[in-house]
Image: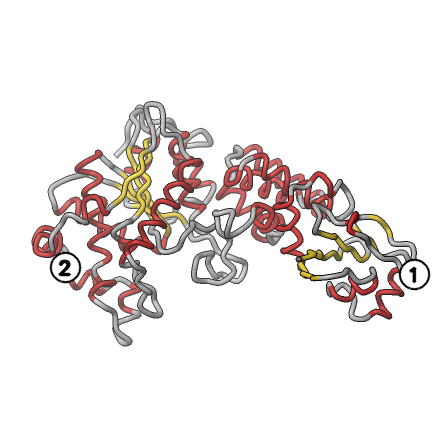
Amino acid sequence: MTDSSLPPPGRDSLTDDLLWRGLIQDSTGLDELRELLDGADAATFYVGFDPTAPSLHVGSLMQVTMARRLQLAGHRPLLLVGGATGQIGDPKASAERTLNPPEVIAGWVERIREQLAPFVSYTGDNAARLVNNLDWTGEMSVVEFLRDVGKHFPVNKMLAREVVRARLETGISFTEFSYQLLQANDFFELHRRLGCQLQFGGSDQWGNITAGVDYVRRRGAGPVQAFTTPLVTKPDGTKFGKTEGGSVWLDPMLTSPYAFYQFWLNVDDREVDRYLRYFSFRSRDELEELAKATAERPAARLAQRALAEELTSLVHGPEETGQAIAASQALFGRGSLDDLAPATLRAALTEAGLVQLAGDLPDVAGLLRDSGLVPSLKEARRVIAEGGAYVNNNRVAEVDATVSPDDLLHGRYLVLRRGKRSFAGVELRG
């Protein structure tokens, strides 16, 4: 259906901007979605995060930034942390999930709630709200769940879900099989309690999401709408997530702000334009101009720098971003190492390779060898003699040079560099 009060399709329409960015993969209907998102009235939407780890990760960043994007457009976010569903876990294609103790999950719920807080506003007419599905699921008896929820779900439809089909031969527990019912009931409860009209999630959630839409209808409520975003993938097609290896977390204790900044700075040229469209809050005109400038000067990596700076500021704040940028420059001799906070310096050296030593420090040649920058003392002396060795960005002039305690940054660190781009760190312990 078409509403004459909607803005015409184009660059100023929220829905069209989302389509241009590639942020809508599946939907219950683009016309209905456009009416909801581009209409004059604010829509209430929800997105869920299961606490199956102590932190969100960059794969979750798609949903977090989408919630922020919709709120900036005037809509009301409900951010659901799954205190109930997190105790079960959505089925995986390979094997049963490990069930974590309820008290561990409760702690993760609080950590994730805190992580979500900076991304949205909790004031104003469209203030965000944090919700926990344990509030309505925990009080429901087994009989109530089977009678009031289970009777609305045809088993043949549940079996048709791809991740379930993949597990039929190897086996899937009733626990994971029933996850779809819990998520669908979340949509109904949020619609009933808080007027939620829209759910979105990653494209791997499409089966669960449409089950929720159908369940709301079967309960005589609605109408409600839904859409999915594409999964954030690496160049090899694998997704970013908690179980794919090499996770990049939003928690600074698990992935430092420096490592987070470096992750985006080192994004493959083939992916950076896509990631900017997904995550950046720059306008379409700004992104197109940035893409043009990057194509003209590819070695400058302007797009990667813009992406790294914007996302690190969003997740960790401008101060940590400034430290990450300063560290990137200082480690290669383009800034002062003395200006770096101890945590930032250690994070940067850990990423490069941090060697821990106890007792007396060896000479510079020994440090270069022990840090892995050269394979032998002979090679270390050759590098020093040719003027290619640096300690704390100061060129080493003598082959038998040593370092003193006064050279240690923050009383414990040394930055070693070979040539312009190879560096490592030393930490004195004890």
Check disc 2 and give the amino acid type: Pro
Direction from residue 401 to residue 349 in the image, left or right? left
Q: Position of residue 169 (x, y in %)?
A: 27, 76
At x 57%, y 45%, the residue is 257
Residue 107's place in the image compared with 16, above or below, is: below
Q: Position of residue 177 (x, y in %)?
A: 22, 63
Direction from residue 321 to residue 46 in the image, left or right? left
Q: Name which quarter of the figure residue 326 lies in.
A: top right
Badge 1, how many Cα within 10 Å: few under 14, some, many 20+? some
Give the position of the N terminus as an image quadrant.
top left
**Mark 2 or mark 1: whose residue is earlier in sequence:** 2
Check disc 1 and give the amino acid type: Ala
Q: Nearer the viewer, mark 2 or mark 1?
A: 1
At x 30%, y 64%, the residue is 162
Label drawn at residue 97? none
Q: CA distance from mark 2 to mark 1?
A: 77 Å
Direction from residue 70 to residue 346 in the image, left or right? right
Q: Element under label 2? A: loop
Q: Name which quarter of the figure residue 120 lies in.
A: top left
Badge 2, how many Cα within 10 Å: few under 14, some, many 20+? few
Q: Position of residue 258 (x, y in %)?
A: 60, 47
Direction from residue 387 to residue 424 in the image, left or right? left
Q: Position of residue 136 (x, y in %)?
A: 18, 45
Residue position for label 1: 385
**Nearer to the camera, 178 or 136:** 136
Residue position for label 2: 154
